[in-house]
Image: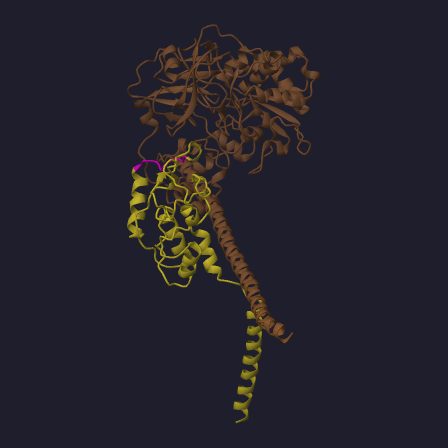
Chain colours: A brown, B yellow
Amino acid sequence: MIKSLLNTLGFTSPPFDGGITPNMCKWTEGSSIKTCPLPPVLIVPLKQHIGQPCTPLVKIGDLVLRGQKIAKAEGYLSAPVHAPTSGKVIKIEEHAIPHPSGMGMVSIFIEPDGKDQRDMLLDPMTNWLQRDPAELRERVRMCGIVGLGGAAFPTFIKLLKDQRHPIETVILNGIECEPFLTNDHRLMVENSATILHGLHIVMHMLGAKKAIIAIEDNKIDAVQAMRENVDLLGDDLIRVEVLPTRYPQGSEKQLIESLTGKQVPAGKLPMHIGVLCQNIGTVKAIDDAVMLGHAITERVITVSGDAVPNPANMLVRLGTSMRFIYAQCGLEKFDNIQILHGGPMMGERLRHPDIPVIKSSTGLLAISDARMKVAHQVEEPCIRCGHCSEVCPVNLVPNLLADHCRNDQLERAANYDLFDCIECGACSYVCPSHIPLVHYFRYGKGQTAQMRREQSFAEVSRLRSEGRDARLQREKDEKAAKRRKLRATLRSESVLNTANEEKTATQPKTEVND
Amino acid sequence: MEQLLYAILSLGTFAFIAGITLAIASKAFHIEGDPLADKIDALLPQTQCGQCGYPGCRPYADAVAKLEVNVNHCVPGGERTMLSIADLMGVEPKALDEEESVPVVAFVREDECIGCTLCIKACPVDAIIGAPKQYHTVVADQCTGCVLCLEPCPVDCIDMIQKPELLEHWSWPLPETHRAQLGAERRESHHD
């Protein structure tokens, strides 16, 4: 209250517009990363990123090595998939993936042989400073690295050294503003040297002049660890910035606003203002790919929630079943428990725990139904208090937007910039009437996308139909022209014939005459 | 008498000038075709299925623009299309002729196809490929599900199958809250 008053009066500068400070529940911030044992079977979905799904490169019965490419990327916006351990491919079929629809995706099932033998196809590039950025970028692409902060956008696309939009500042995103999640926090504490090295590689790839490591003030040990390492190198290009804890500061555009004061325009990317954001885990994966030649086969996730007896941070192989991971933390019965994939604010609820962990899994939460009911109460009418507009980090008017989405007034919702919504959930969090605002926005976005798809399909169909009509008309005209020509030739022939006949008829006469 | 003459003369001159201006304007700002029909055509799903009783989407759009038929005859367009056309025309929305159906695509059972090319000729969007005495097949991405190919097939080897739901095309349903339902019910009653 006093803080917001000070902000309005201009005494302190708010980190970014809006935002909330929820109860962070970072129960696992002190527990070091445990390595999860190998499960009896690993299920690797063919799509673990934003973009087109991959096509499998292996058959049932094939033996694979850890880090071997088992599915190749299709198209530009895609990332290949690698075997998480050595073993045998036992089947390739559809299996549930972490997705709110509950739909499945073709997955490769691998039975580990226990040897965990690595595929040594890619050499370490220890002399990365002499290498061409394009070569390093190709390595990042081949190792299947995607943004590990949850969005899973193929990283190599962001690492393009573009002449028109040179990157000046690399921001290392150590904010981790979602409650419960502590995986980036632990990575920064335990692997600070590797992360810093990875950051240098990224800076080299982009020719960036400076870098900022952004960490919130609830992770002081991480700040210390990173600062120590920066000081050790005596590097004045990299600075560690401590920001006040505020959700959703970890969102790319909000973080840039907090750090630089610049806003990324709607529909533009951070690179358009000379900035690039990378997640902690992603940078570590880049370092592993370049320095060791390791493709991405594992990641750190936080297992937490009030229903988990022993919350922990775990290094798990991609493809490990969530049931197996929960069992490692002491949770085996799932009655009256809800499972969340990701954080409590933006994560999605899953229907059952028999789903593999993928590249975009940041956390696994298990929350008891009783606790969930407190957060999800019965929706009541909007009382126009305006709290949602105050906390919206992109300055939208959530209550109006929700009305338009609920009533299928999609064009109006689009006019109120529905598509700028980052779905952070701050509005739903503060709503005193418990309106599931973000859910309405997701509905509205989905319906609009569906409508646009239908419109473009109708346009294509119309063009095809018009093309067909034109072709039929042309064929008809051609046929008519041919017929006319034929008739004309026939007529001329018949004229000729009659002339001939006349000739033959007259010939005898001439003969007679002769 | 003189005043009367002035009045007639002045008003007559005005009328003459206005008439000439209008005549020029109607030539200068002339628009080819019917702009309203174009707008309606843009709202239609372009399946060219003929279920409205017209030979295609464009003829139906023309007829609606001339107020010859109601706005509720486009079956594949469903309620959303009907509402947007009614909104454009400024008429009362009407309930649909038929129940909205799930999106379908045609599928040729190739082992039964005799290669007669009749379905190829019937397809309004050229989405069936094949040659005489060769198996035909439907390009599923371009099929509008108009069912016009079913009737001419002499061996009934074409099925209409439900369009597969893609993960990328999945979208969130409305929240299952009481208020969302209330709103939906109110809309339903409004349409009837």
Position in image of residue A159 (x %, y %): 62, 26
Q: Is residue A353 left or right of residue A192?
A: left
Find out whether residue A170 is within the magenta segment.
no
Looking at the image, which residue is at 42% across and 54% down? B57
Question: B77 or A68: which is nearer to us?
Answer: A68
Q: Residue B92: x percent and y percent? A: 34, 58
Horizontal and vertical percent position of residue A160 = 63, 27
**Residue found at x 41% / y 34%:** B170
Please state which of residues A138 and A478 is positioned toward the viewer in this rendering. Answer: A478
Q: Which residues are magenta?
A: B170-177
The residue positioned 67% from the left and 22% from the top of the image is A133
**Which corner quadrant of the image does residue B21 belong to?**
bottom right
- Side of B55 relative to A479 (left or right): left
Identify the residue at the far right of this view: A130
Q: Nearer the viewer, residue A333 or B51?
A: B51
A373 to B48, vertically: above or below:
above
Residue extending furthest bottom? B1
Vertical side of B147 occupied by A289: above or below = above
Q: Give the residue furthest to the top.
A: A115
